[in-house]
Amino acid sequence: MWKNELTTLLNINYPIIQAPMAGGPTTSELVAAVSNAGGFGMVGAGYMSPNQLRNQICEIRELTEKPFGINLFVPSKYTADPEKLRTATALLQPIMDELQVEEGPVLPTFERDLITFQEQVNIIIEEKVPICSFTFGIPSPQVVTKLKENSIVLIGTSTTVKEAVMIENAGLDVVVVQGAEAGGHRGTFHGQENDSLIGLMSLLPQTADAVTIPLIAAGGIMDGRGIMAAKCLGAIGVQMGTAFLVCEESGANSLHKNAIMEASEDHVVLTKAFSGKMARGLNNRLIEVIKQYEGVLPDYPLQNELTKAIRKSSAAIGTTAHMSLWSGQSPRLAKKLTVSELMNKIINEAKSLNQKL
Amino acid sequence: MWKNELTTLLNINYPIIQAPMAGGPTTSELVAAVSNAGGFGMVGAGYMSPNQLRNQICEIRELTEKPFGINLFVPSKYTADPEKLRTATALLQPIMDELQVEEGPVLPTFERDLITFQEQVNIIIEEKVPICSFTFGIPSPQVVTKLKENSIVLIGTSTTVKEAVMIENAGLDVVVVQGAEAGGHRGTFHGQENDSLIGLMSLLPQTADAVTIPLIAAGGIMDGRGIMAAKCLGAIGVQMGTAFLVCEESGANSLHKNAIMEASEDHVVLTKAFSGKMARGLNNRLIEVIKQYEGVLPDYPLQNELTKAIRKSSAAIGTTAHMSLWSGQSPRLAKKLTVSELMNKIINEAKSLNQKL
């Protein structure tokens, strides 16, 4: 029941992909453990410097001989609107004072982001990483061609049928279909984020009817039930974030892991507070404070930089009040396990469910 | 693969329930056709007078000997805020002028709604309708007891795990789990509508782990793929609205049916514009006009009464601009078929998918 086009393409035993959660969770231990267990580990390299990326690739190779992948954020244009920056800074100042944050933000620029992206792509080619996935857009035809010339399998991320079609048309090999259930940032890159919040029950079959490349389902999937359901709806693999985020090997802050373990599905909200881009996580004070100003925040990734020191400081003093607690809509299904225990559990669940159907 | 606790309880061949879409779609022809095809037809009686309800029950019994059910809206308290009513009336006046609507609204009261609900319950008992489902809340213990004394099977509607637990604790027999994908009104009755938009991929397994009564999955399900996926996630039946709404036997306006046939998943939005309560449907002019005033609209069902003549008039002159075009998030899966053709199609799809798994 596990072998398919995707397991062949990725050279893995089970079509279970660990979501590339940028910003800490995807330690080398996590990525290697998933690949060693027969799944596919991924590095969330969106916020990494080229050096950090190269070091992590080497580190993972010390821990596993199995394939793993890298996820990159495709840069998109933004402008630093001085008024929005002033508003956001003023909003955040009382929190910075309270947390005694003194570190000021170093604002990114689109030009700098483009250079970093190009450097990340070059490292992937140099290090012969076999699989590369993208979030927030489709890389340029030049980048796609260059990666494909180096036999690198390319995975896009879609939140609507149109985006999946665009990804197929751009020549990518596989598409991750991100349902509204998914934790972390919305991958939406075409159209409005608000119009792209489509549950997997709807999004998967509609996407399956519109594209021919293999689909990977992402959003709310935490166990064998979700894997089998995704299969019924037309996906041939799943990408799981929250389920792996709470694992022992994950680098997520333990406050974050514990908050998910104690949460219920109705505590998981959508917010732009942390980065300027819509993302799903557990509700907390920062989200509530920023809520009514979501329409006037600086563009991603500017807002992300503005809140960086606050998030860090909140974690350092041991409170979740101002941390980004990314989570999908299924926190009640989270289990504190090792990766190997989790993989065994979900594989057995899927097998036994398959027999019952 | 079809027989289970639910098919036994409802005395049907296939655990496929036609959603009780209030306000027109659930003609006697539709309800009877679904039941005659081995599924379970339901009357959306939420807006019906006791006489209308009694007449439709008799009419359906002329068309089928199979069981069918009735859905009622559980009244909840609201107050007529004069300022909100003034604001909404002022907002709607230009549209009323444009459409030459002269009919003024007859505002309902909670007391009157309670009496109607009680009368509807009495008719269900007198007419020995075997199954009754509820939306927007749980009926009082007195009503539950009275219906159960008459051996009527009771179905609640939940949008969160907590609501499903409340429904089970109130002694109802079955719970419809309404995912964020669902078209029409959100059934949310506990907590905030915004916190209760949970995709079925997340909501079903979390609910299945929390209650012991049978689950019916609702939201975005239009074909055999959705039925099998719902089964994997812990439901033993499905409730389908949009799929039946576009059927030949449905009483939905043909403008509404055609709009769904032409829509894509990202045209389906959430709005309070039509009724004051959150509902999902195709975007149009009325939704856009009211959008920024959603926070100050009169409570449901007051706003529903305020927009009634506008919706009617919009349909009469043949434009969808001001109609409520309820739809789930899977319009691309809609097929214009007869009920019997649709039932055959989805049953065959589910069977063939089952063999492939």
Image (cartoon, coloured by chain):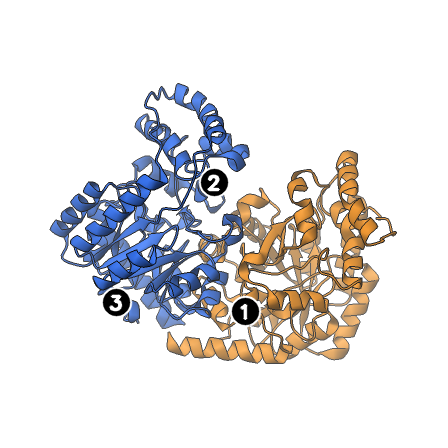
Chain colours: A orange, B blue
Residue shown at 23% from the left, 63% from the top:
B149
**Number of disc labels:** 3
For marks 1 and 3, give the CA distance: 29 Å
Q: Residues within 10 Å of mark 3 (few under 14, many from 20)?
A: few
For marks 3 and 2, give the CA distance: 35 Å
Q: Which of A305 and B193 lies nearest the eye of the viewer?
A: B193
Residue shown at 56% from the left, 52% from the top:
A159
SS state under label 3? helix
Quarter of the image with the N terminus of chain B is bottom left
Q: Are marks 2 and 1 in contact (CB under 8 Å)?
A: no
For disc 2, the chain is B
Residue shown at 54% from the left, 67% from the top:
A332
Q: Which mark is residue A333?
A: 1
SS state under label 1? helix
Identify residue type, mark 2: Thr
Q: Residues within 10 Å of mark 2 (few under 14, many from 20)?
A: many
Q: Which of A193 and B80 lies nearest the eye of the viewer?
A: B80
Q: Which mark is residue B140?
A: none
Task: List the residue tagged with mark 2.
Answer: B271
Q: Is residue B88 above or below residue A95?
A: above
Q: Which of A193 and A13 lies nearest the eye of the viewer?
A: A193
Task: List the residue tagged with mark 3.
Answer: B9
| Image location of residue A196, percent across then percent down | 54, 47
